[in-house]
Amino acid sequence: MQLSKSEEELMNILWKQKTALMKDLLASYEDPKPATTTIATLLKRMTDKGFIAYKTLGRSREYYPLVKKKDYFSKHVNGLIRNFFNDSASQFASFFTQETELTKEELEDLKALIDRELKKK
């Protein structure tokens, strides 16, 4: 299951804060802030999808993520590679390195990451 763009934005806040009350979530948005009802709707949807849960604290709810950021984005990247690059990580890497405006330093960092992973194999 996937999150909408608005849900991902809210999920990123929760991943960063680890736990948050409604007021904490609202405070994390820049002006103009979304309506409380909008955030409540997003939280309900995300709870129904199994991405977050909450603990009741008096009359408030403390929300927390059930899915790790790394796991969520790993599924997205793997789906992207499968659906748009014929399940070829090489095609994805080629597209990524050629079509993004990476600096020489960023490319060298990527190369170092790949070299480290090769040593583990």
Image (spheres, helix red, strand yellow):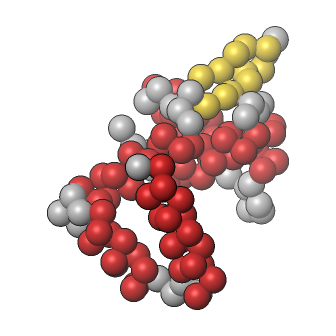
Which residue sits furthest left? 86
Q: Is residue 25 above or below residue 53?
A: below
Relative image position of residue 47 (x, y in whole percent):
52, 27
Residues 17 and 29: in front is 17
Tell me: residue 24, above or below residue 21: below
Q: Is residue 81 visible?
A: yes
Left or right of 89, for residue 112? right
Location of residue 53 in the rendering, given as x and y in whole percent from the top left corner? 59, 23
Q: Nearer the viewer, residue 22 or 92?
A: 92
**Residue in view at x 18 percent, y 63 percent:** 86
Horizontal side, residue 97 vs residue 32: left or right: left
101 horizontally vs 9: left or right:
left
Instruction: Let me know if residue 38 appears in the view.
Output: no
**Along the horizontal axis of the image, is 97 left or right of 116?**
left
Tell me the residue at 68%/27% (across/down): 63
Q: Position of residue 114 (x, y in %)?
A: 48, 64
Nearer to us in this view, 109 or 85:
109
The residue that appears at 47% across and 43% down in the rendered structure is 72
Quadrant in which the N terminus is drawn: top left
Q: How many marks?
A: 0
